[in-house]
Image (spheres, rainbow, N blue to C red):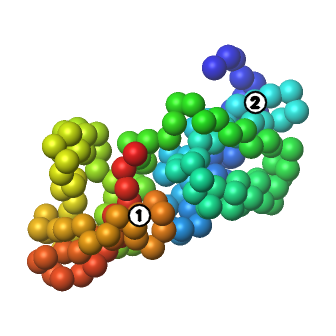
Amino acid sequence: MGKQRPETANQIDRIWQVLDGVMDPEVPVVSVVDLGIVRDVEECKQGFNIIITPTYSGCPATLQIENDIAGALKAAGFGDAEIVTRLSPAWTSDWMSEKGRQALRTFGIAPPQKGSNVSKRALFGQDPLVRCPHCDSMETVQVSEFGSTACKALWKCKSCAEPFDYFKCI
Ligand SMILES: [Zn+2]
């Protein structure tokens, strides 16, 4: 990042604040920033570019997320900001912030597991170990690869018998 005029830095901070108020349409407790969808805010000749990387390609929520971001920016006086979709590097669930993961748990959704736990088990054809968001038990089992949306799988806890969504890792 080059040298910025102080007012530019302030505006970029303000844009991040606005973006942090834009919630994922499917999980309305997690912002697009905490999901790791917003990669960067860059100054450009016309104003600002908002760099986003959609979570799951073909996720129907992507278009709505773009519209929501554009709407929030316009309402905050950044109507000239442009949303730029960057597909590479591809989004990974590791980009989700700790705050985002905690919010998912509170919402009753098991957050995606990070890195090695998933890849090692996948190597042996095993499902990841997923903690029940209701009672914290690790005695859980996948019921269906498809949950309430394409991005989630349906799991069930053997300890408290509650079903829950697991936000899939990619
Ligand atoms: Zn449970």
Q: Alpha-carbon neighbours of circle 1 within 10 Å: few (<14), some, or many (≥20)?
A: many
Which residue appears farthest toward the top when viewing the image? 2
Q: Quadrant of residue 88?
A: top right
**Relative depth, front residue between 106 and 159:** 159
What residue is shown with label 2?
43
Q: Quadrant of residue 12?
A: top right
Q: Which residue does the image show at 36% across and 50% down from the upper left?
A: 169
Which SS class for mark 1? Answer: strand
The residues bearing labels 1 and 2 have C-alpha atoms spaced at a distance of: 35 Å
Q: In this view, does 161 lie to the left or right of 67?
A: left
Identify residue type, mark 1: Lys
**Relative depth, front residue between 98 and 121:** 121
Residue 22, numbered circle: none
Identify residue type, mark 2: Glu
Residue 140 is at least partly visible in this image: yes
Q: In this view, does 128 lie to the left or right of 28?
A: left
Q: Which residue does the image show at 35% across and 64% down from the upper left?
A: 145
Q: In which quarter of the image is residue 131?
A: bottom left
Q: Alpha-carbon neighbours of circle 2 within 10 Å: few (<14), some, or many (≥20)?
A: some
In the displayed structure, 162 sits above or below 44; it is below
Which is nearer the N-term, disc 1 or disc 2? 2
The quadrant of the rendering that contains the C terminus is: top left
Q: Which residue does the image show at 64% across and 35% down from the upper left?
A: 86
Residue 22 is at least partly visible in this image: no
The percent position of residue 29, horizontal first and vertical second, equals: 49, 67
What residue is shown with label 1?
152
Q: In this view, does 74 lie to the left or right of 123?
A: right
In the displayed structure, 14 sits above or below 90; it is below
